Image (spheres, grey):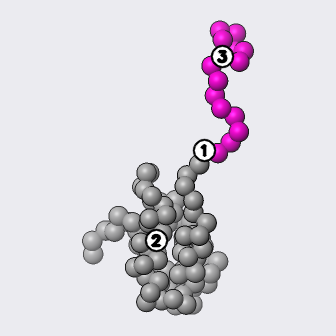
Amino acid sequence: MERDPLDPKGLIRESYRIEGITEPECRSVFLDWALSLPVGQDVQAAISEMTERYGAEHPAHPMTQVLREGQASAGPARRRGGWRSRPRDSEGQV
């Protein structure tokens, strides 16, 4: 089988094949999947693609619900933290 660049480990695909998988388990799979996306990948686009690919055939599946929640909550990447690096003088003063 060809490797899917949006699901390289097959996590989303396999979650739909696990009979009786629960929503908390799907959340765990989703997090692992999201963290394994390539750097620079548009997460929102990847979530949308996974939802389109699997959600229509499995609207009541817990992973579909998790993907839809991910679509609603995934915003653009933002810088975290409140401190910005400022130039310091030779004595380490800002």
Spatial CA distance of label 2 from label 1 is: 23 Å
Which of the marked residues, 2 or 3, is nearer the chain's N terminus?
2
Q: Is residue 64 above or below residue 78?
A: below
Residue 11 image position (x, y, % from top left): 46, 73
Q: Which residue is tagged 2? A: 48
Q: Residue furthest left?
A: 2
Q: Residues within 10 Å of mark 2 (few under 14, many from 20)?
A: some
Can the viewer see residue 47 in this picture? yes
In what quadrant of the picture does the C terminus appear? top right
- Which residues, given as a range, are shown in magenta? 80-94
Spatial CA distance of label 2 from label 3 is: 44 Å
Q: Is residue 81 in the magenta section?
A: yes
Amino acid identity at mark 1: Arg
Magenta highlight: main SS: loop
Q: Residue at x 31, y 68 (%)?
A: 3
The numbered disc on residue 54 is none
In what quadrant of the picture does the N terminus appear? bottom left
**In which image quadrant can residue 88 be found?**
top right
Q: Which residue is tagged 1? A: 79
Q: Is residue 41 above or below residue 33?
A: above
Spatial CA distance of label 1 from label 3 is: 22 Å
Q: Nearer the viewer, residue 38 or 76?
A: 76
Q: Residue at x 53, y 81 (%)?
A: 64
Q: Residue at x 55, y 76 (%)?
A: 68
**In which image quadrant can residue 52 be found?**
bottom left
Q: Are marks 1 and 3 in contact (CB under 8 Å)?
A: no
Amino acid identity at mark 2: Ser
Residue 73 image position (x, y, % from top left): 61, 66
The secondary element bearing badge 1 is classed as loop
Q: Which residue is tagged 3? A: 88
Amino acid identity at mark 3: Arg
Which of the marked residues, 2 or 1, is nearer the chain's N terminus?
2
